[in-house]
Structures are given as structure tokens and as C-alpha cells.
Image: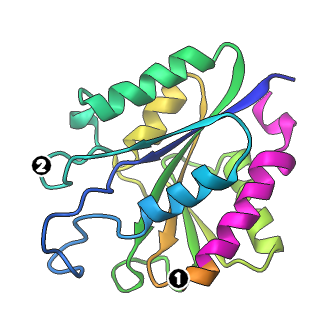
Amino acid sequence: MRQKFVILTVPHAACPTGILGYLPHHLCDFIAEKAARGLDERIEVPHTLIVGDMERLDCDLNRPHCRDTPFRHRIRTFIQKFKSSHQVWVLDIHSFPHAMTDYGTAEVAFLEDGETASRYTSDLADWLRTNEIFARVHVGAADGGADIETEARSLGVRSTLIEFNEDLSPARLEYILDIMKTWIDTDWPDFLFS
């Protein structure tokens, strides 16, 4: 079996100066970068972290019209470099304000831009649930807003969009990241990526 390679992406990390809340729109993902850096520090499989540096109002890095940015070029470069020699998985990391979504009280939500959830996304969601983490999978609801996931799949690699609830306590986020690390490093089922 080929070695794993994970590409952690955070397209909405850059917050406009002075933004302290969610009004009038969710202009950045307030805990996505923290979650991504937590995974970056934890996981042991080969990986890279790519953090967006453009504000969402200037160019939403997870939309097709922003594919020609340095952030998106870096993602494609890593995919092309590793896809022939590794099992590549793009984990596109976001966060959501509990009050502004239909994810309810989910701690973690997965957004699948298709008709059914991919087996690897479903497996990870099941793994989180097994470890008493409230995870939901939303299928077909991305409405073009999951372009990193869409483009990665068009390039022949696996991709998942994950959202962390911004109301998570720091301790709960740490716990979730520890559980995800175990799945990524050891329990990632090879049959899902063959």
C-alpha cells in the first residue's frame, strides 16, 4: 500500500481587522486555523499545512473564481507532486458559528458536494461518533462553495471539507483533534483509498 500524504488547507483564516463577531456575515472561520495547526502538530504521517492569507471579501479561496491564487496553486502543486506515489487526502478545514448554520449542535460537520457522502468522509464521521463526538454529514449542500474539495477530486485525489463548531471549548477541540489524529495516523482504512 502506498504511503499517506495529507494536505491540510484553511481558506478562510484571514479575518478583516477589527472583526470580533459574526455580523453581518461570517467573514472568516474563527477557529479553523487553530484546528488545522493542532492537527499539523499532532499527525505523524507526511503532510503539509496551507493557510490562506486573503480576506474572504477580497477573494473567497474556496470558490472557482479564486483558483488562480497562490494559495490554490500551492494545493495543486502538492497534489501533483504526491498523487502518483502516495495516497493523497486533502482535508479542507473550516469553522462555523453555531447560531448561523443548520448544523444544529453538531461539534463537527462534513460538507459533501455530491449526491452521496464519500466512504472516507463517512468512515471518519463514524469514527468520531464512536468516540462520542457529535458529527453530522451534509450531502449536496455545498452549492459551489466547496471548490477545493471539488478540484482535488477532479485531480484524482480524496478530499473532505470539515467544519468545527466555533462554540467548542478549547478542551473539547483538543479532544476532537486527538481522536482525528488517531484515525489519520493509524485507523485510516487503506481500502478507502485504493
Q: Position of residue 147 (x, y in %)?
A: 38, 40
Seen at 55% across and 67% down, the residue is: 109
**Quarter of the image that includes the C terminus:** top right
In the rendered view, does 11 fall on the left or right side of 27?
right
Mark 2 lies on residue: 58
Seen at 52% across and 63% down, the residue is: 35
Residue nearer the viewer, 188 or 112: 188
Residue 37, magenta (yes or no):
no
Q: Which amino acid lies under the numbered mark 2 shown in the image of this protein?
A: Asp
Q: Position of residue 95 (x, y in %)?
A: 43, 67
Mark 2 Cα-neighbour bin, 10 Å: few <14, some 14–19, many ≥20: few
Residue range (magenta): 173-194
Q: Which amino acid lies under the numbered mark 1 shown in the image of this protein?
A: Leu
Q: Quadrant of residue 159?
A: top right
Mark 1 Cα-neighbour bin, 10 Å: few <14, some 14–19, many ≥20: some
Q: Quadrant of residue 176?
A: bottom right
**Quarter of the image that includes the N terminus:** top right
Vertical placement of 38 versus 131: above or below?
above
Q: Position of residue 93 (x, y in %)?
A: 48, 55
Disc assigned to residue 168: 1
Q: Position of residue 112 (x, y in %)?
A: 53, 52
